[in-house]
Image (tube, helix red, strand yellow):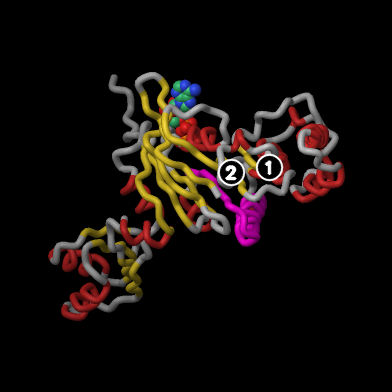
Amino acid sequence: MIEVRNLSKAYGPKKVVDEVSFTAEPGTVTGFLGPNGAGKSTTMRLILGLDEPTAGWASVNGKPLRRHKDPLRQVGALLDAKAVQPGISAENHLLALAATHGINHGRVQEMISFVGLESVASKRVGGFSLGMHQRLGIAAALLGDPSTVVLDEPINGLDPEGVLWIRQLLRQLADEGRTVFLSSHLMSEMAQTADHLIVIGRGKILASDTLASILTLNRTQNLVMVRSDELDRLCDVVLAEGANVRMTSEDGMEVDKLPAREIARIAGLHNIALDELRPLRPTLEQAYLNLTAHESEYSSSTYTHEKG
Ligand SMILES: Nc1ncnc2c1ncn2[C@@H]1O[C@H](COP(=O)(O)OP(=O)(O)OP(=O)(O)O)[C@@H](O)[C@H]1O
């Protein structure tokens, strides 16, 4: 279990983690989601005792990680997959880590084959791709069979097969009763992987809830997909009723602000046949954009050409 209470970290006058409190429970995949610079990595570093908080505290399995005698068995962490000595082999990297905790050679071999790195185990890590680094990082994180796992952007650089593998692995770890805490800014990934979501923006927690509740509470649109051969006419009549529309194809559009039943009624009234009428489920992307609308440290604007 991870407990974080009123945790703050300031660099100079800037509070990059601001009074953050949450609990990541055993048996649950907890996703930590937020825009670039929101404070995700800093919070993770504070949990792992790699940085000193300005205020507040974080504990892993009941006490600060630094006070545990066997940290590798308490928490398996993957923060920066590339932060491995480039001249060392994958196997020697894991053996060195294992030696600090009396973990045997067999476990190292087991983890190497578990992450699929057998064929390159004796190769220098410096030549590894990002995806191979990630796999090595996962092997290192799981070496001590920890009850809590903390992973910062674990699917970065992985191919689709690797992404699926991580997703299944995280589920398995949680089902075994472990605490799984991972960050990502890939919303589709979080929507598929996390049971509980914590959304952070500019160092503050914006939401902490189940995925379903976050989707419901932050629903900003009630979109309905409509297809018809008489789309132009239908468009005019729903616009007249106060709806917003967005054309998605030659015969299809998304309608906002009118429920499906009302669209059907209006179409019937004007003798317009419908080929499809389907309420769209709210997406995490929608909810997230709503939550973080004012909380991005770096936000983009529309690209404009240089004015001559
Ligand atoms: N050592 C440091 N000194 C000064 N500022 C820092 C330091 N580490 C992080 N920051 C700042 O703290 C803020 C939060 O950074 P952090 O890396 O925690 O964000 P993040 O949510 O993990 O972002 P990303 O998704 O881009 O990795 C950023 O503005 C960053 O520039």
- In magenta, the rendered stretch is 161-185
* In the image, the residue with mark 1 has its CB under 8 Å from the nearest atom of ligand 1: no
Tell me if residue 110 can be seen: yes
The residue at the point 50 percent across, 50 percent down is 24
- Where does the image place residue 253, in percent across and percent down from the top left? 31, 63
Give left or right: position of 87 versus 255: right
Residue 155 location, x and y as percent? 59, 45
Question: In the image, is 14 to the left or to the right of 233?
Answer: right
Q: Amino acid at mark 1?
A: Ala
Pointer 2 residue: 150
Q: Looking at the picture, which amino acid does disc 2 mark?
A: Val
Q: Earlier in the sequence, mark 2 or mark 1?
A: 1
Marks 2,1: beta carbons within 8 A: yes
Q: Is residue 162 above or below residue 226?
A: above
- The residue that label 1 is drawn on is 141
Vertical order, 58 against 188 (above or below): above
